[in-house]
Image (tube, helix red, strand yellow):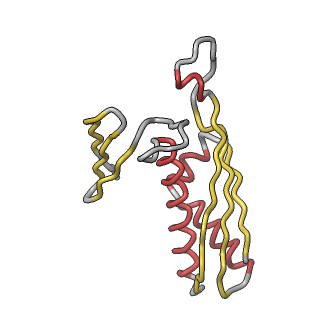
Amino acid sequence: MELSIRAVSAAAKETKIYAGNATLLSGVQLNLEPSKERASAVELLLSSWAGDVAAGFRARLEKRGVVVDALELSVRATLEGALVHLGVIGEEGVPRVASITAAIYLTFDGEEDVAHAALEEALARAPVHQTLLRATSIDLRLSIM
């Protein structure tokens, strides 16, 4: 199976990404400014991972007949080489996501072991998660409310 997208950079801090019938807007590669209009490419990467995990987890829970009241992910990432990305003279290394730490908050009517089994299956079947798992450290915790 192959997927294709198009990315068109028509303005300084904006790239339009066409994926199927969807259009996404991306800002700069890595934004270190507190105020910004668009998500950076790194934030979109993390968002894609969060969406992959959340959608897959919910689908695996529902397949088991579990009614989900609320499911939320909170994601933090540690970046290496941000100053290398900015071109700071004397900085060395590679700009990359060094680690991802996330918590899933789940409110549901079911057994805790069912939730853990559903999460394990979801992660094993999640393409973005499996890709990033080979590139960076991921610490994901499940908190059942």
As rendered, which of 74 and 99 lies closer to the eye?
A: 74
* Residue 22 figure quarter: bottom left
Where is residue 144? Give x, y as percent: 73, 75
In this rendering, the answer to whether 127 lies above or below 56 is above
As rendered, which of 28 and 2 lies closer to the eye?
A: 28
Give the residue at the far front of this rendering: 35
Please tell me which residue is depicted at 69% across the width and 57% down the height of the picture: 140
In this rendering, the answer to whether 93 lies above or below 144 is above
Where is residue 46? Give x, y as percent: 54, 50
Where is residue 77? Give x, y as percent: 64, 45
In this rendering, the answer to whether 121 lies above or below 30 is below
Q: Quadrant of the C terminus?
A: bottom right
Please tell me which residue is depicted at 63% across the width and 17% down the height of the picture: 92
Where is residue 79? Give x, y as percent: 63, 36
- Whether residue 21 sits left or right of residue 105 in the image: it is left
* Residue 53 figure quarter: bottom right
Total numbered badges shown on the rendered structure: 0
Please tell me which residue is depicted at 51% across the width and 37% down the height of the picture: 31
